[in-house]
Image: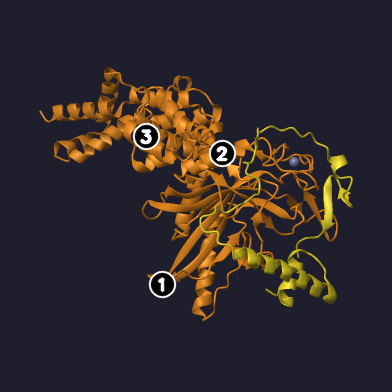
């Protein structure tokens, strides 16, 4: 039987505010344990939360970016559970009335057609602290509450994805979006962008959903894909063996390559939400909505379309170049030097991104400045060098951060466009290859390429190929008499 | 509405309260009375009445995004029973 997966994602993004959601403690990552805490985030009796306006503005921006509705009035609720890294015994979250509802996001999966994914809701909540289970003695857990109270938005999708590739495309798009908006640094290793997946399968063609499991600990795009693949296969096996899939939380173990049941989590799933009496309803004013809207940058989809229109790029190239705001800005700076947009796109995507990916370097750390890459492209356009030689120039540029003109000069890579120099070399090659000349005269026109190749070889690839072609043909044709 | 024993025990477990059987019976009785009261409230016709999340007719005040708390770990950890190298130490929380 053919099965189809039904996937929904819950994404937690830490908001890039300076202070916490309900207190004036710093949110900086990596500080010494428990140095960024106060009576509010430690849950001391008698302390009261006061909401951070900037966190609200960022949540509203996210809502606007996914074309969602911003609720004029939303409510904070307590989610009750006991865990040592949650000092109050509850997490302040939003339940019945979240700040954002009914959005959508366009994805372009690697396989399959572009698609709109529904966003059910986006709500605000506070992060928990961190538990360290190793290194503090037998049977001991050490608690660091610096992260406690850091603002999060939870972005809940509709169960609209039908393959792991779609889930990854959705997650990548959200990731790119929060970074465009500069509301989250998107760091998955440090946990500032986290993802849980709800996965079920059903026989292909059936309307009704199967029982879903919730997968946790998916801390990279690759793990999201692997975990969903694994879970689909696991559920299929259970069903084919005549069993039932249980609704449960399962932890992805990246090293073992499997998911396993987190039974301990089950009992805690009764959270007894209720409106937090310490917090009044959140009213998002017109002023705040306008402020958020006016600070929205050009978003990936709009930028992609503009790149296609203004620079004549193909959809795919425009998509790649707009994955991040930094990359898009870099590309536009290359074009701003006067370089041809299509050639500039090629050099940015193929050569530069290729080299950066190999080193694991970010575009913002590129050893080649956009201005220098633009100049290199222009040297191809003005025929100082050929495209092939340009690759030889690119390498030392990347390694040393030097500008292209210096390298071209130093390595003597300037293209030979001097007709008399080319003519002399062509004559030499003709004189050295009588047999091939005879073949040409006998009508084997293909041998022309051989002569061009020989001339290019003699000039170290520096001769202008079009010119060489022309001269070779002229000289050989002259022999036909 | 009478609260049965099983539900009472479940509530106690979620609230991390240890109840002996006699206490459990008392608590079940108290909670049942509260539920009865809720049942009476539910008889009121609330059609057209906005749900109320908070008794005060005010909106949540917002504060500017400023770090105003300086590190104060030693003082804040005074009431903690077990601290090591700035961490709170608690019984191991995973199996
Ligand atoms: Zn605090």
Q: Depth-wise, is mark 1 or mark 2 nearer the camera? A: 2
Q: Is residue A360 visible?
A: no
- Can you identify the residue that label 2 sits on? A58
Q: In this view, does A67 lie to the left or right of A12?
A: left
Q: What residue did someone put label 1 on?
A: A2
Left or right, A342 with reference to A267: left
Spot occupied by residue A129 in the image (x, y as percentages of width and height):
73, 49
Give the label on residue A329, or none: none
Chain drawn yellow in the picture: B
Label 3: which secondary element = helix
How far apart are the two marked residues, 1 and 3, measured between alpha carbons?
A: 40 Å
Q: Label 3 belongs to which residue?
A: A307
- Circle 2 chain: A
The first of marks 1 and 2 along the sequence is 1
In which quadrant is the N terminus of chain A drawn?
A: bottom left
Whole-angstrom CA distance, mark 2 to mark 3, is 27 Å
Crowd rating for badge 3 (residues with CA inside 10 Å; few <14, some 14–19, many 20+): many
Name the residue at 45% across, 70% down.
Answer: A202
């Amino acid at each position: 039987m053919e099965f189809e997966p039904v996937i929904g994602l819950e994404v937690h993004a830490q908001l890039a505010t300076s202070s916490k959601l309900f207190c004036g403690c710093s949110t900086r990552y990596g500080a010494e344990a428990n140095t960024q805490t106060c009576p509010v985030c430690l849950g001391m009796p008698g302390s009261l939360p006061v909401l951070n306006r900037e966190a609200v503005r960022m949540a509203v921006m996210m809502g606007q970016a996914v074309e969602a509705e911003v609720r004029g009035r939303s409510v904070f609720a307590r989610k009750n559970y006991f865990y040592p890294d949650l000092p109050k015994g509850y997490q302040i979250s939003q339940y019945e009335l979240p700040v954002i509802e009914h959005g959508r996001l366009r994805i372009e999966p690697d396989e399959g057609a572009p698609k709109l994914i529904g966003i059910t809701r986006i709500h605000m909540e506070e992060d928990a602290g961190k538990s360290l289970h190793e290194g503090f003695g037998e049977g001991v857990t050490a608690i660091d509450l610096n992260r406690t109270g850091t603002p999060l938005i939870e972005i809940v999708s509709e169960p609209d994805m039908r393959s792991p590739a779609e889930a990854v495309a959705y997650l990548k798009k959200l990731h790119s979006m929060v970074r465009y908006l500069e509301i989250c640094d998107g760091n998955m290793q440090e946990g500032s962008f986290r993802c849980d997946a709800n996965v079920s399968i059903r026989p292909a063609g059936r309307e009704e959903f199967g029982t879903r499991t919730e997968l946790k600990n998916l801390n990279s795009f690759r793990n999201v894909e692997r975990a969903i693949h694994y879970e689909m296969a696991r559920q299929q096996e259970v069903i084919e063996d005549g069993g039932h899939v249980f609704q449960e939380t399962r932890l992805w173990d990246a090293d073992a390559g499997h998911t396993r049941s987190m039974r301990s989590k089950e009992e805690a799933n009764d959270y007894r939400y209720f409106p937090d009496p310490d917090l009044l309803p959140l009213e998002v004013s017109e002023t705040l909505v306008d402020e958020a809207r006016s600070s929205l940058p050009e978003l990936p989809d709009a930028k992609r379309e503009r790149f296609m229109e203004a620079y004549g790029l193909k959809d795919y190239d425009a998509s790649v170049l707009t994955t991040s705001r930094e990359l898009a800005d870099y590309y536009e700076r290359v074009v701003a030097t006067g370089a041809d947009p299509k050639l500039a796109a090629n050099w940015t995507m193929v050569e530069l991104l290729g080299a950066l990916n190999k080193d694991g370097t970010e575009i913002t750390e590129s050893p080649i400045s956009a201005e220098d890459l633009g100049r290199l492209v222009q040297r191809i356009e003005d025929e100082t060098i050929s495209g092939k030689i340009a690759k030889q120039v690119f390498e030392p540029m990347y390694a040393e951060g030097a500008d292209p003109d210096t390298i071209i000069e130093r390595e003597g890579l300037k293209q030979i466009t001097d007709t008399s120099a080319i003519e002399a070399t062509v004559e030499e090659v003709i004189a050295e290859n009588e047999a091939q000349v005879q073949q040409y005269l006998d009508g084997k026109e293909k041998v022309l390429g051989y002569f061009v190749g020989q001339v290019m070889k003699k000039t170290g690839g520096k001769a202008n190929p079009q010119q060489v072609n022309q001269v070779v043909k002229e000289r050989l044709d002259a022999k036909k008499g | 509405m009478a609260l049965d024993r099983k539900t009472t025990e479940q509530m106690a477990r979620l609230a991390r309260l240890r109840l002996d059987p006699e206490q459990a019976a008392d608590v079940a009785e108290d909670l049942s009375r509260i539920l009865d009261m809720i049942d009476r409230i539910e008889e009121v016709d609330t059609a057209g009445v906005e749900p109320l999340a908070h008794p005060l007719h005010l909106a949540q005040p917002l504060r500017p995004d400023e770090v105003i708390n300086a590190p104060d770990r030693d003082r804040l950890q005074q009431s903690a029973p077990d601290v090591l190298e700035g961490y709170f130490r608690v019984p191991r929380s995973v199996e």
